[in-house]
Image: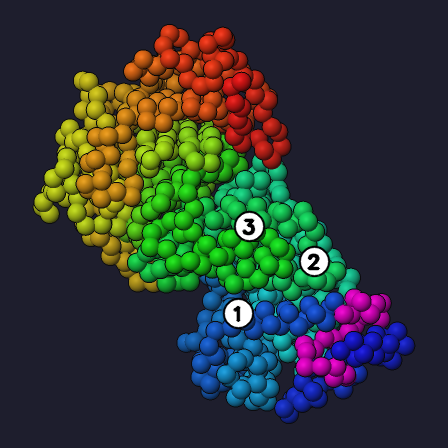
């Protein structure tokens, strides 16, 4: 092979021909002509490459040859069964067009914006090209001349209708690319279809066909891919500049073009752009990998499960292909990729019914509008664990290899990978708590982040999806395929003035009003808080704190609740698939009583989750429930064409009394329990609510000698803790508003600046009479002052700890 490459390089340097072609087919193209305008070599049974530049070195040629081989293998590896190809060949017209009954060729302003149906034309061509290239066990298609001619016919049909007005790239439907579409060319009003969707199919198809492309096909291929890559450095109408996953999608098109034309400069530029994205993004609304392992897209949305997943898949392919060449990632890029995987693993759970790995819905924003059967981001994690393991070994990365091996293990609980503990994603207002048999996720939003989005008519009713949404995955099927039928004012975990906000696509997306949102974590336990004002109506406000404690115990506090509407204000416990038996105050309720309000209920258990409900002197917190079959249309919430869905749903909520709306409440959650385990834990666990008002929300976990507190006021405050049993009373004082965990047994104090505005904070802890906690220095110095200097840049909002000396 080295000799063949040297011969090729010599041919280039001697200037034998402007265009040089390598062919892997050992001279056999099975009846399909190779362009006679190009000089051919047959170096090995390897991927063909076309050389259009004489300014290339032998070492570059060697790298590109390796890249081409691996790239083609990668494309072929993603292929599914080509069983439909004989049918496609029969129905393809002489003009290269399939019947309208098979492919919707609607173009221009009349075409659907999301998932443009006309893409099916190129999906088929790409699958046909893969089969022609050669798939295991499908020798009847390999280098088949009939199949190859059909591909040319289909390509010719599209190329003949490809748009030449560059304004149609991203400005379809405007005067510069009007809806009348007089030349009847193929374009979509969604820039994504023109810039990424179709060019990706084109670039892969053309690379697979490589040496058999006619001059006309070659020129059309490179015109479309060059047009896509040319979007770098310009502002895209409806998007802005390319960032994050979009950058990677276009980079892949550029790399395929570079491999097709053997353009070393284009490849260097493409990989350079890719690796500039494979870095930690520290801007507040940055798209891409954030320092905490979350993935941002669309300037303030956490999207690990869709755009982050696409970003990951793109890089997996690129880095496996580039390993050992001059195009491989730098150390900083590798570390950034590892950071993303470290964050991803916290967001993945397993549906134990189907055995499928899924992304938490809070990592999918608008893609909640798709049922799993549609094959979108809700179907599964859509990550190739074998490829992740392969790259982990190539890079000697424990993070990647552990990600692949732990998730590849078949678990019997929702906690995929048996990952235990707590993690705060401070750049995207998201906390995850994982027990041995459950996964709980909490999604908030602030003045730094967005609640959700509605794009292409997907997710029009998702306004409340980050209002403190609390998903509890026990069996793992609780929330799958229910969004078409569920009540969008009963989002799990939220506090809402029911029905007071009009839900529509135009008003779904908002940046939060309040900055004081976030959490603190020591990796095992955590505390999150959210100050909320409805960003659309301004009619509802509250403060809420979530305590994720040891021994699978969670506590929720609501305070400072205020509403200026007549709507009922409720705090939703859950809305999920019905999980069978429902127990209220220890007794199973009758089927006929499953839509009701229960006065003065003390406990509720359903589907592996138990609740100890609030009590208040002079105020009754009633329990509301609704259980039964609900029907909804997927087309009402997005672009799915699946039929109407009927789901048996369970919903439960606490009703805030209208006459005393501001009365604080708290309730305890025990996830992953049987009815008997719930009863036992609810009696044995000793959790003291120290304070729950507009100034401080705090608890003392007696069993673990741990204080957790939110200081809401800008000036901080003082918290009095009285453990009892002869232990010394404790005063905790903060100079500013923050979240705090004080673990008395170790003397560790962990804090976080939820507003992400502070430079430092003073925390003073004093002990009174009685047995002091460790360390022994309390005896000589009963007051300890700790000064925390908060980090800046990408670490703003992260947790910091000190040990009391």
Q: Which residues are magenta?
A: 40-62
Circle 1 Cα neighbour tier, 10 Å, few/some/many (<14 / 14–19 / ≥20)? few
| Label 1–label 2 contact, CB within 8 A | no
Q: CA distance from mark 1 to mark 2?
A: 22 Å
Disc number placed over residue 78 in the picture, else none: 1
Asked whether the beta carbons under mark 3 and mark 2 sit within 8 Å of each other, the answer is no
Instruction: Decide if residue 661 is on the left or right side of residue 411.
Output: left
User: Mark 1–mark 3 contact, CB under 8 Å?
Assistant: no
| Residue that label 3 marks | 399
Describe the element under mark 1 as helix, strand or loop: loop
- Crowding at dot 2, Cα within 10 Å, few <14 / some 14-19 / many 20+, comes out as some
> In this view of the protein, which residue sits in the foreground, 767 or 580?
767
Residue at horizontal 45%, vertical 59%?
408
Report, in whole angstroms, how far the alpha carbon at label 1 lies from the one at label 3: 24 Å
Q: Earlier in the sequence, mark 3 or mark 2?
A: 2
Residue at x 51% of width, y 53% of height: 402
Q: Residue furthest toward the right?
A: 14
Q: Position of residue 355 (x, y in %)?
A: 35, 60
- As for residue 568 lying within the magenta part, the answer is no
In the displayed structure image, the side of residue 558 where residue 151 appears, left or right: right
Q: Main secondary structure of the magenta part?
A: loop
Looking at the image, which residue sits at the far front?
Answer: 776
Where residue 777 sits in the image (x, y, percent)? 50, 13
Q: Which of the two discs, 1 and 3, labels the residue nearer the N terminus?
A: 1
Distance between the Cα atoms at labels 3 and 2?
18 Å
Mark 2, residue position: 328
User: Badge 3: few (under 14), some or many (20 or more) residues near its Cα, within 10 Å?
Assistant: some
Residue 273 at least partly seen: no
Residue 416 visible here: yes
Residue 164 against residue 682 in the figure, above or below: below
**Along the line of sight, which residue is nearer the eye, 705 or 534?**
705
Q: Quadrant of residue 146?
A: bottom right
């Amino acid at each position: 092979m080295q000799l063949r490459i040297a011969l090729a390089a010599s041919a280039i340097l001697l200037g034998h021909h402007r265009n040089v072609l390598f062919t892997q087919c050992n001279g056999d193209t099975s009846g399909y002509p190779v362009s006679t305008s190009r000089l051919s070599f047959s170096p090995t049974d390897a991927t063909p490459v076309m050389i259009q530049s004489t300014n290339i070195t032998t070492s570059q040629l060697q790298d590109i040859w390796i890249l081409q081989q691996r790239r083609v293998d990668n494309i072929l590896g993603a292929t599914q069964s080509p069983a439909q190809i004989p049918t496609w060949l029969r129905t393809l017209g002489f003009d290269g067009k399939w019947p309208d009954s098979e492919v919707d060729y609607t173009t221009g302003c009349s075409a659907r914006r999301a998932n443009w149906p006309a893409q099916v034309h190129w999906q088929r061509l790409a699958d046909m090209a893969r089969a022609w290239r050669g798939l295991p066990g499908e020798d009847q298609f390999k280098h088949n001349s009939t199949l190859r001619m059909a591909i040319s016919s289909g390509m010719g049909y599209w190329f003949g209708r490809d748009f030449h007005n560059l304004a149609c790239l991203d400005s379809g439907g405007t005067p510069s690319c009007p809806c009348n579409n007089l030349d009847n060319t193929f374009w979509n009003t969604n820039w994504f279809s023109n810039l990424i969707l179709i060019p990706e199919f084109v670039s892969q198809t053309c690379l697979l066909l490589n040496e058999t492309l006619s001059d006309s096909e070659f020129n059309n291929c490179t015109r479309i891919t060059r047009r896509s890559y040319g979007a770098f450095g310009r502002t895209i109408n409806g998007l802005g500049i390319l960032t994050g996953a979009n950058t990677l999608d276009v980079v892949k098109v550029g790399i395929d073009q570079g491999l097709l034309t053997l353009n070393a400069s284009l490849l260097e530029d493409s990989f350079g752009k890719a690796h500039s994205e494979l870095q930690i993004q520290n801007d507040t609304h940055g798209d891409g990998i954030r320092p905490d392992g979350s993935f941002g897209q669309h300037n303030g949305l956490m999207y690990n499960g869709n755009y982050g997943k696409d970003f990951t898949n793109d890089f997996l392919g690129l880095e496996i292909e580039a390993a050992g060449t001059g195009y491989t990632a730098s150390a900083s890029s590798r570390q950034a990729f590892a950071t993303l995987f470290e964050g991803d693993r916290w967001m993945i759970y397993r549906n134990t019914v189907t055995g499928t790995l899924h992304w938490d819905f809070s990592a999918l924003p608008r893609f909640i509008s798709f049922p799993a059967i549609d094959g979108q981001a809700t179907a599964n994690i859509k990550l190739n664990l074998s490829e992740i393991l392969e790259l982990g070994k190539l890079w000697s990365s424990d993070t990647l290899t552990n990600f692949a091996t732990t998730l590849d293990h078949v678990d019997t609980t929702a906690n995929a990978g048996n990952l235990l503990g707590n993690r705060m994603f401070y750049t995207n207002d998201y906390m995850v708590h994982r027990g041995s048999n459950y996964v709980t996720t909490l999604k908030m939003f602030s003045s730094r982040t967005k609640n959700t989005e509605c794009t292409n008519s997907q997710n029009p009713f998702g306004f409340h999806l980050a209002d403190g949404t609390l998903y509890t995955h026990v069996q793992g099927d609780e929330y799958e395929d229910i969004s078409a039928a569920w009540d969008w004012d009963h989002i799990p975990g939220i506090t809402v003035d029911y029905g007071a906000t009009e839900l529509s696509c135009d008003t779904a997306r908002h940046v939060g009003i309040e900055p004081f949102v976030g959490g603190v974590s020591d990796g095992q336990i955590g505390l999150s808080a959210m100050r909320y004002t409805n960003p659309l109506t301004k009619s509802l406000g509250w403060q809420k704190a979530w305590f994720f404690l040891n021994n699978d115990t969670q506590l929720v506090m609501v305070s400072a609740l205020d509403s200026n509407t007549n709507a009922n204000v409720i705090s939703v416990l859950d809305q999920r698939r019905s999980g069978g038996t429902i127990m209220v105050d220890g007794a199973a309720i009758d089927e006929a009583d499953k839509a009701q309000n229960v006065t003065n209920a003390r406990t509720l258990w359903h589907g592996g989750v138990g609740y100890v409900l609030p009590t208040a002197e002079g105020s009754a917190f009633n329990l509301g429930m609704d259980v039964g079959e609900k029907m909804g249309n997927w087309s009402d919430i997005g672009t799915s064409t699946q039929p109407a869905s009927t789901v048996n749903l369970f919903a439960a909520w606490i009703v805030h009394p209208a006459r005393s709306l501001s009365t604080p409440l708290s309730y305890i959650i025990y996830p992953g329990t049987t009815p008997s385990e719930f009863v036992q834990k609810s009696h044995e666990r000793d959790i003291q609510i120290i304070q729950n008002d507009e100034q401080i929300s705090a608890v003392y976990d007696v069993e673990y000698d741990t204080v957790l507190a939110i200081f809401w006021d800008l000036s901080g405050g003082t918290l009095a803790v009285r453990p009892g049993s002869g232990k010394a009373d404790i005063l905790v004082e903060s100079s500013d508003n923050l979240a705090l965990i004080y673990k008395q047994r170790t003397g560790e104090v962990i804090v976080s600046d939820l507003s992400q505005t502070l430079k430092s904070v003073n925390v003073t802890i004093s002990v009174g009479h009685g047995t002091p906690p460790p360390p022994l220095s309390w005896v000589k110095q009963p007051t300890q002052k700790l000064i925390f200097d908060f980090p800046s840049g990408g670490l703003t909002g992260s947790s910091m700890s000190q040990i009391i000396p």
